[in-house]
Amino acid sequence: MKRCVKRVPFLLALLVSVASVASAELVEKVLARVNDRLITYSEFEKRVAAAQHGPQTTTDPAQLRRDTLEDMIREKLLEERGKEQSVTATDEEVEMAVERVKRQYNLATDSEFDAALASSNMTREDLKKQMRQTIVLQKVIGRDVTSKLDISDDMLRTEYERQKEKLYHVPEQAHVFEIVLRFSPSDPSARAAAAARLEEARTKIAAGASFADVAREYSEGNARARGGELGAVSKGELLPALDAAVFADPPQEFPPPVLLSGSIHLFRVTDRKPAGYRPFTEVSEDMKKRIGESLYDKRFAEYVEKLRREAYVKIYDPALAKAEEKKKS
C-alpha cells in the first residue's frame, strides 16, 4: 500500500522550511540532540516560522513550538534509521519530485519557479536537498511500516459485518414519476380546481394514456419536461406524506393522490427495491483504504515511539524540556 506525504505531517514541513547548513551546526547554539544528530536554534526557528504560514493544527504559539520540535526529532530518528539501512535517493528521483512540486503549484517556467522559491527564501539546491531527505524518509517508512501492514480478506469481512449497518445500509428505493398541481393555500376554489384538473389527468392515465405524456401536459412540477420523472428515490427523501404514498405497503404503482397545503400530487411508482446493504465486493476497496489509514497511523506512532525509546534524546531549551517531561509523566 502506497502512502502519500500528506499522511506524515512532519514531512510536509520539509517542503516549506529552509534547508539548514550542516557546517553551521558546529558553531550554532544547539537546541536538542538526537543521538549524534543536532537540532540548532536557527533551523528550529526557521521551521517554526514556516509552520506559522502553513496549515496548522494549533493556534497556540507554545504548542506550535512543541509540535515543531517533535517533528524535527522524528526526522532525525528516521534519518538515522535510513543511514543504518543505507537508504538513498537517486538524482532521478529528486528531479522527478521537484517536477511534481512545479506541477502542483502550476509553475510553468523556470523564472516562475525561481521566483516562488525566492519568496520562501529558498534556492533550487535547497529544495533538492529537502526533497532528497523527504524521499529517504518515505523509503524508511515504507520499509519499516507500510510494507508490514497486513489487511487480510478476513479482516475486511469482519469489519464489513461490524460496520455495514452504520456505513453501508441502503434504504428502500423506487423509481418515481410525479404530476404536481399547485394552488394558493388560502384559496379554496383554487384548491378545488387543482383537484378537478388532477382527476382529469388520472382519467386519461386510466384510459391508457402514458403517465409521462400526461405529466408533460398537466404537471406544474420541475420534472414536467422529463415526463414527471424524479428518478430513483430513497425512502425518507420526500416529505412524510409523499413518502408514505410512494412507499405504501403493499406496493402500488398508482397510489392515491396526496393533498398538501399548497399542492396536490399524483405518483407512478415502479421498480420497488427493498432495503439492504451495499455488497462487500463493492465496498471492499473503500474499506481497505479506510482501515489501512487507521492501521498505518497506529503502527507509525508505535514505530516512532520505539525509535525514540531506543535513542538518546536531549532537549537543552528549558521550556521545551519541561514540556517534554510533563508529557512523559
Image: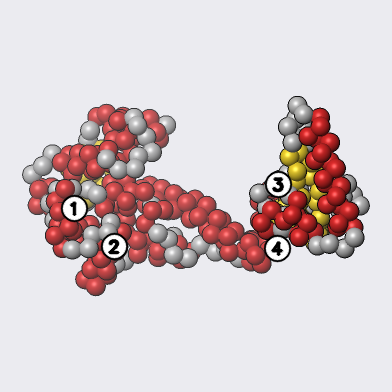
Residue at the spot of label 3: 220
Query: Callout 3 environment at 10 Å: few (<14), some (14 to 19), or many (20+)?
Result: some
Look at the image and tell me in which quarter the C terminus lies. Answer: top left
Q: Does the residue at mark 4 contact the one at mark 2 (Cβ under 8 Å)?
A: no
Residue under label 4, please give it.
Answer: 279
**How far apart, in angstroms, are the residues tagged by discs 4 and 2?**
38 Å
Residue 226, position in %: x, y? 68, 58
Q: Quadrant of residue 210?
A: bottom right
- Check disc 2 and report the residue beneath it: 103
Give the amino acid at mark 1.
Ala
Instruction: Name the kind of residue labelled 4 in the image.
Output: Pro
* Disc 4 secondary structure class: loop
At label 3, the amino acid type is Glu
Q: Is residue 90 visible?
A: no
Residue 264 as seen in the image, left or right of residue 11: right
User: Upstream in the sequence, badge 3 or badge 2?
Assistant: 2
Q: Are marks 3 and 1 in contact (CB under 8 Å)?
A: no
Indicate the amino acid at tag 2: Arg
Q: Which residue is mark 1?
A: 116
Of 189 and 254, the residue lying toward us = 189
Q: CA distance from mark 3 to mark 2?
A: 50 Å
Q: Earlier in the sequence, mark 3 or mark 1?
A: 1
- Camera-nearest residue between 266 and 284: 266
Of the two numbered discs 3 and 2 in the rendering, the one whose residue sits closer to the viewer: 3
Q: Nearer the viewer, residue 213 or 137?
A: 213
Marks 1 and 2, how far apart in space? 13 Å
Label 3 sits on a secondary structure element that is loop
Tell me if mark 2 has few (under 14), some (14-19) or many (20+) residues whose alpha carbon lies within 10 angstroms of its own: few
